[in-house]
Amino acid sequence: MTDHKGKLSPLLKQATGITAAKGEGAYILDPQGNRYLDFTSGIGVTSTGHCHPKVVAAAQKQVATMIHAQATTVMNPRLPELAEKLGELTPDPLDAFFFSNAGTEVAEAAIRLVRQATGRPNLIVFHGGFHGRTMGSLSLTTSSVGLRAGVSPMMGGVVVAPFPNAFHYGWSEDEATDFCLKELDRIFVTYSAPKETAAMLIEPIQGEGGYVPANTRFMQGLRERCDAHGILLVFDEVQAGFGRSGKFWAHQHFGVTPDAIMIAKGLASGFPISALAAAEETMAKGWPGSQGGTYGGNAVAAAAAIATIEVIREEGLVANAETMGRRLRDNLHALKKDYPEMADVRGKGLMQGVVMHRDGHPDGDRAGRILKACEQRGLLMLRCGAYQEIIRWLPPLIVNQQQIDEATGIFEEALKATA
C-alpha cells in the first residue's frame, strides 16, 4: 500500500482556469464567489441553465425514490414517461426510443441499427462532422485530426462526403451545394454502391466542425437520394437539437424528416442521458441484444429530462433561443463591420460561431487569446474548428437580452485587448 495520492490524468485539459463551485442560471461562481457568464453551457448541456429549480426538484425526488433501476433488468417508470414526452416532440413516424448515457453511445447504437435494419455495410458521413469519441463514432468523425490521431485504423465501411461549407470553399451557397450533391452522386458510382449503403449520417448544423448550418436544398437532396435508394437518413441533433437552434430540432429549418435522430446534451440539463429515436418498425429490425447498457436511461437522469422538457415548454425557451439568437447575431454582425479579423459569423439561434482569420488564414492563436481575455472579464466561452479558430457562442436557452449585450460588450473589449 503506497501513500501517494491520486490525481487527474495529465491529458485532461481545461479550456478555462475556472473552478466551478456553484451554478446559478446563466452564471458560474468560483470558490471565491466571483461570477462568470457561462456561454459554454457545459458544451451545450445546461439548456435550462445551471440548477433550474424544477429540474433540481425532479432529480431530488427521484433520488429519494429510486436511483438506479437497470433498464434491461427492471423498468423504471420514468423511462416510458420520458419516451411518451419525446414522442410528442419528434416528427412522425419517429415514435420509438433507445436510451443511453451520451451522444457517442447513441451514435454507436445508430451504426448498429442502420446496418442491421438494412443488411448493408456502408455509412456516408460528411466532412467536418463530429459524432463522438468511441471507436465507431470516432470513425464517423472528421472535425479535427487530433481526435483520431494515434488510434488508427478506424472502423471500415465509412465514406466521407463534402459538406456545403460555402465559406470554406470560397463559393456561393448554391455553388457549394451543387458541388456537394455532385460529389455525393459520384460516391455511389466510385466508392459505395447504393445497395451497399445503409445510411447517411449528418449534423444539420455542424458543431465541433465549426458551427456550420447545412441548407434546405442540400438536405432535401439527401432525402431524395435516400428515398430513391432505400438508404436511411440519420440526423445527429446531439448539439444543435432540443431548442438550441431556435426551433426544437435543427432539421426543422430545412423541411426534411429523418429516419432516426440522435439526441443528448441539452436533454436533461446536465444529467447524463441520451436517446436514439426511430420509427418502431425501423427499431424492430435491429437484432436482439444490440441495445442495452448498465447505466443507460438512469432513473434520475430520466426524471431530470422530463422536467427539462416541461421547463422548455412552460418558459417558451425555443422561442427565446430564436429571439436571443437573433439579438446575438445582430450584435456580432455589428462588431464584424469594425473588426475585419472576424472573417465570418454563422449559425442559428443560440449556436453562433465567429471565425477568426489573419491575412486570410485561420487564426486559432488569436481566438485562444480572445477567450482568455473574456475569461478575465467574466465571460466563459469555447473554441472549435479544425484550427481552433472559431469562437462559439453557446449560452443557455434561458439567456436574456441584458446578458447577450453584456457578453458581446466583453467580447469587443477582448478584441481590442488582443489586437
Image: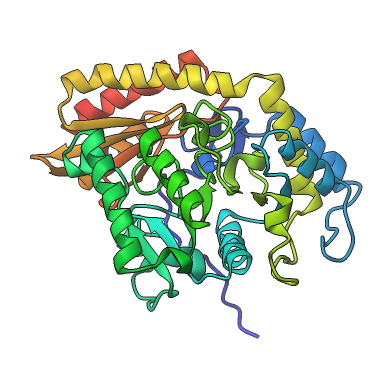
- Seen from the viewer's position, the closer of residues 231 and 331 is 231
Q: How is the image coloured?
A: rainbow
Horizontal side of 160 relative to 8 (left or right) equals left
- Looking at the image, which residue is at 24% across and 39% down? 166
Residue 417 x, y percent position in the rendering: 21, 29
Tally of marks: 0
- Looking at the image, which residue is at 54% across and 27% down? 247
- Seen from the viewer's position, the closer of residues 323 and 42 is 323
Horizontal side of 29 relative to 308 (left or right) equals left
Work out which residue is located at the far bottom of the displayed protein and give it.
1
Q: Image quadrant of residue 335?
A: top left
- Seen from the viewer's position, the closer of residues 126 and 355 is 126
In this rendering, is residue 391 above or below 314? below
- Looking at the image, which residue is at 49% across and 16% down? 323
Residue 46 x, y percent position in the rendering: 59, 37
Q: Is residue 37 visible?
A: no
Location of the N terminus (image quadrant) = bottom right
In this rendering, is residue 125 above or below 238? below
